[in-house]
Every structure is written in C-alpha cells, then in structure tokens.
Image: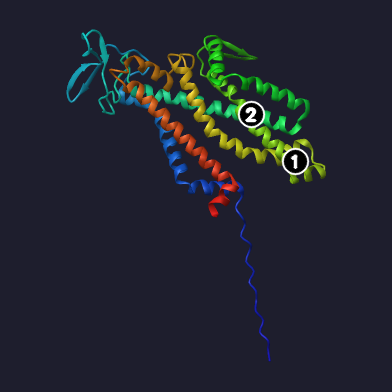
Amino acid sequence: MAIGTTEVLSTPATQSAGPWRTAWRDLRRNKVAMGSIIVLIVIFAACLAAPLYASSVMHLDAFTSNLDGKFTVNGVTGPVMQSSDTGLGLGVNPIGPTWLWNNFFLGADNQGRDVMSRLLYGGRNSLVIGLVSATLCCALAGFIGIVSGYFGGGLDAVLSRGLDVLWAFPVYLLAICLSVVLINQSLTIGPITLNSGSIILPILIIGVIYVPYVARPIRGQVMSLREREFVQASVGAGATDARLLRREILPNVLPTLIVFLPLMTAINMLTESALSFLSIGVQPPDASWGTIINDGVGLLYTRPMVAIAPGVMLAITAVALNLLGDGVRDALDPKARLRGAV
C-alpha cells in the first residue's frame, strides 16, 4: 500500500512594514489629520499665490498706498476711500467687502490697499516664521536635550541651569524685551549681518525662547532611554557614544521631535502675530497676519473685516496644526495603536 506524501508549499514570510511606513499608514487612516493636511495645503498654496493674485487679479501693489484709487462694482465706479457715514460725517472710510474675487473681496484698509492681497502676503510671512522658528526650536532643543540627558554630570548641570534661566522669564515678556532691543537695529553674527526689520530676527527670537519647553521633555526621555536594556546591551558590546547616539538614542527621540514640530509651529505663529500686533515683530513694508490685525484696530467699528479676516485665518491654521500634531502623535505612538485595537 503506497503511502501518499503531502507536499508542503512554503510561502515567503510576509515582511512586516517598518515603523515609519506603519505610522504613515495610520496617519492616512486618521480622517481628522488628513483633513487638517488638506486645509493647510490650501492655505499654503493660496499664500504662495499672493503675487499672482495682486498683479494679475487686482492689478494693485499690496504695499503701496492707494488713497486715490477707484473701484467698479456692477458698472458703478467710486472711490476706494469714501466719505464717512457715521457721526458728523467727517473724514473717510475705506470701502467694505464687495465679495467679488477680482475687486476688493475683503475691502480696503486705511491706506486704500486691498485687504485680500495683504492677507495672502501676510500669511506667507506668518507661515514662514512659524515653520522655520519651530524647526530651529526643535533642532536646538533636540541637541541640548540629547546631549544633556545622555552625558549627564557637569555638562547636564550647565545646560539645565541655562534652560532654567530661559524658563524663569515669562515667554511673552522675554520675546518683547528681545524684540525691542534687536528689531530696529542691525545684528552681526560672524560674517552674517541681519538688517533691521529682517524677518530672520523674529525667527531667531521666537525659535530661542521656546527651546526650554521642548528640551526638557527630550532630556527626560533620553535619561530614561539611557537605562533601557537595549542601550545597556550596546554599551556591553563596546558601542561608542557616537554610535549609541546615532543608532539607539536619536531614532527613539526623533518621533517626539516630529510631534512637537506642528504644535510649536502653531504656537510660534501666535507668538509672531502677538509681536507684530505690538509693532515689534514683522516690520513695514512687510506684512503678517499680526500687522494686518493691528491695521484693522482703528477700523474695528466701521470696517471690522480688516481685523477679522487675518484673525480667522490665524485661528484656522492654528487649529489645523494642532489637529495634525495630535494625529502624528497617535500614529507614532505604539501605545495609541494598541489602545485602538482593544
């Protein structure tokens, strides 16, 4: 009696996706985070198109006074600066919103300039300052936190005390003090000279003042990682400090820094707008959402859209960045995936 043999077909084991690919897959499944990304892309694209809108649609310079300008709506032509219709009728008020994309959609400011054009130009500066200063902050904080937490000892004491000094100042008070001192004078750093009014100055100021708020959590995480079994095993195997930092510490700290990036971008944008509102942030002729809000304060009762529009854009962008940060945190946190699977 012949005994049949069963042939076992071996299939290659399915390779598990890497942590970054898994995180990206989880982020794509998060509808709120993906919606926030779409909102941010639309805002970024609209702000990048500011020169095109000003030159090809409005045919006006967003930074030049337009007190004698004219507008045409439904075949009717009138002055951009109209006689006041309140009180004794003295003075002039800029035209209000026409809700026409090609003709003072959000109205004009007290210089007759198109608010929509300035809103897009101001968004470019606000977004650039927020993103670049957040990147600078996370990079400095990551370096200080890793070095301080890993090496410890006297180096940790010096760096920690330096963070404590920055931490002791109220953040807005420190930002205002630095801005008042630096914003209206040239700053020379080695071979680099920054002219007064350069947007690099608020980037540096805002990027530095928030370093302790990111560096301290990173330092604590590194101190915890230093005692983990896989790090101790690498030490026992003779790994150098450079290799440990590059292969064991940095990959475990990097997700935390990535989570901090959109959150700090939102916070830095709000800080920049506050400084610009006080006239110690972005300087004329440049504009930001904070400077436009400042321009609209005097028109709050007659043309409130001048101040409301940049405020709404600032709020939408900050909320989208915070929701994106929450989604990135959930995607990069294995515990969050385990909680979702339960």
Q: Mark 2 points at which residue?
A: 141
Tell me the quadrant of the picture where the N terminus can be found. Answer: bottom right
Q: In this view, does 188 lie to the left or right of 151?
A: left
Where does the image place residue 262, in percent across and percent down from the top left?
52, 34
Can residue 48 be seen at all in this image of the molecule?
no
Mark whose residue sits in front, 2 or 1: 1
Residue at screen point 28% across, 17% down: 302
Helix, strand or loop status at disc 2: helix
Q: Mark 1 points at which residue?
A: 227
**Protein image colouring:** rainbow
Residue at screen point 30% across, 15% down: 112
Residue sitting nearer the eye, 253 or 115: 253
The answer to whether residue 268 is above or below residue 28 is above
In the figure, residue 98 lies in which quadrant?
top left
In the figure, residue 153 lies in which quadrant?
top right
Q: Is residue 250 left or right of residue 76?
A: right
Tell me the quadrant of the picture where the C terminus can be found. Answer: bottom right
Residue sitting nearer the eye, 31 or 22: 31
The crowding category of the residue bearing disc 1, from other C-alpha atoms within 10 Å (few below 14, some 14 to 19, many at least 20), is few
Where does the image place residue 205, in percent across and percent down from the top left?
56, 19
Helix, strand or loop status at disc 1: loop
Residue sitting nearer the eye, 98 or 179: 179
Which residue type does callout 1 highlight?
A: Glu
Q: Which of marks 2 and 1 is nearer the N terminus?
A: 2
Which residue type does callout 2 highlight?
A: Ala
